[in-house]
Image (cartoon, rainbow, N blue to C red):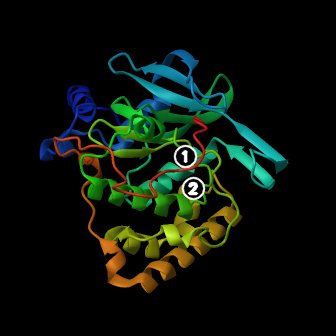
Amino acid sequence: MRLHRPAFLLAIALVCADVSGSATQSVLAPTDQEIEEFLRTARVVRTRSAVKGVTGSLRATLSDGTLTHDAQIQTIDERKSEFRGGKGPAEFNFRDDWRFNVAAYKIDRMLDLRLVPVSVQRTWNSTRGAFTWWLDDIQMDEGGRLKQKVAPPSPACWVDQVRMLRVFDQLIDNTDRNLGNLLIAKNWRVWAIDHTRAFRYSKTIRKPGELIGIDRQVLARLETLEFESLKASIGDYITDEDIRNLLSRRDSMVAHFKKLGDVALYDRREPALGCSSGSTPQFEAAAPGLRVPSPSHRQ
C-alpha cells in the first residue's frame, strides 16, 4: 500500500498542531497502516542518540524521498536470571526486549486505546529492532509537568486518560512506567512510550486499588480478547506463556470492574482531541495519584 503523499503531509501538519477539536483532523490523519509502511520501508538518513534513556535507543531521521520524519530505534534484547534496578527487591528472569514495544502497540490498537505510537519490527544494520514513530507535538513529559507545576486545562479529561493508562499498564504488566515515558502533547493528549520492560509474569492485576474507572467500550473489547487472536497478532513478539498471563490478568481486571459496577464506567473523549480547553489553571492537587514512580527517563 502506498501513501497518498499530499493528504499524508497535510495530515502530519494537522497532527503536529495544537488541536482544540476538529472532525477534519480525524478524516485527514494518516492511518496506522500508512505509518507502519513508512517506518518499515523509508531510508534511514541519519541517527543520533535519543538523549534520555538507558537502553541505548537512537533517534533516526527517515525519508522515502517525499516524506521525512523521525523514528525511535530500539534494539535492546537483554535477559538476566536476576536483576536489581534500584532500591526494590531483585527481579528474577528479567527481560528488556524491543519486541515488547511492538506487542504493546498491537494490544493498544486491539483495544482501541490509542495511547501508544505506532511501532514496527525492522532490521537495520543487520540487527532486528523496533522502529517507533517519533512524536513531534510533545510539550513535556510528566516529570516536566510536575516540576513546572502545570495543571491540565481539563482535570476531568486528564484523569480519564490516566485511568486508561493504568488499565493498559496493568494489563501488559508494565512495572516500569515513569515520569519520563509518559508524554504530554500540546493538546494535552497522553502518550505512553517505551514498553521494553513490560510483560512481567504476574497472573493477576498488581494494584487493583488504582483501577477506579474504565471506558465502557474498552471494557467490552477486553472481554473479547482470546488466545488465538492474540497469538496471531503478537505471537512473534511474546511467548505463549506471556499471552496466557495477559489473559489471566484480563480476567482479574474484568472481574474487578464488574464488582465496581456502573459507577466505574464512562464514555471517554476521542483520544486525538486531547484535553485542551483554551485555558491553563493554576497548579493544584486536582488529580491526586497521577504521579508515576521513579523519574528514570528510560527511552
Q: Amino acid at mark 2?
A: Ile
When the figure is inspected, residue 160 is found, relative to residue 37, above or below; the finding is below
Q: Position of residue 257 (x, y in %)?
A: 44, 78
Residue 102's disc is 1
User: Is tag 2's residue or tag 1's residue first in the polypeptide sequence?
Assistant: 1
Which quadrant of the figure has residue 13?
A: top left
Which quadrant of the figure has residue 157?
A: bottom left
Nearer-the-camera pick, 290 or 115: 290
Contact between labelled residues 1 and 2, with CB atoms less than 8 Å apart: yes
Query: Is residue 265 among what the camera can see?
Result: yes
Q: Nearer the viewer, mark 2 or mark 1?
A: 1
Residue occupying the point 57% across, 37% down = 130
When the figure is inspected, residue 255 is found, relative to residue 61, above or below; the finding is below
Residue occupying the point 57% across, 68% down = 207
Nearer-the-camera pick, 85 or 230: 85
Q: Position of residue 239 (x, y in %)?
A: 69, 59
Q: Position of residue 35 (x, y in %)?
A: 38, 36
Is 245 situated left or right of 82 in this image?
Answer: left
Q: Quadrant of the C terminus?
A: top right
Q: Amino acid at mark 1?
A: Val
Nearer-the-camera pick, 259 or 89: 89
Residue occupying the point 31% across, 43% down = 31
Q: Mark 2: which secondary structure? A: helix
Name the residue carrying label 2: 234
Q: Mark 1: which secondary structure? A: helix
Nearer-the-camera pick, 68 or 18: 18
Q: Quadrant of the N terminus?
A: top left
Is 205 situated left or right of 96 in this image?
Answer: left
Q: CA distance from mark 2 to mark 1?
A: 8 Å
Residue occupying the point 46% across, 32% down = 39
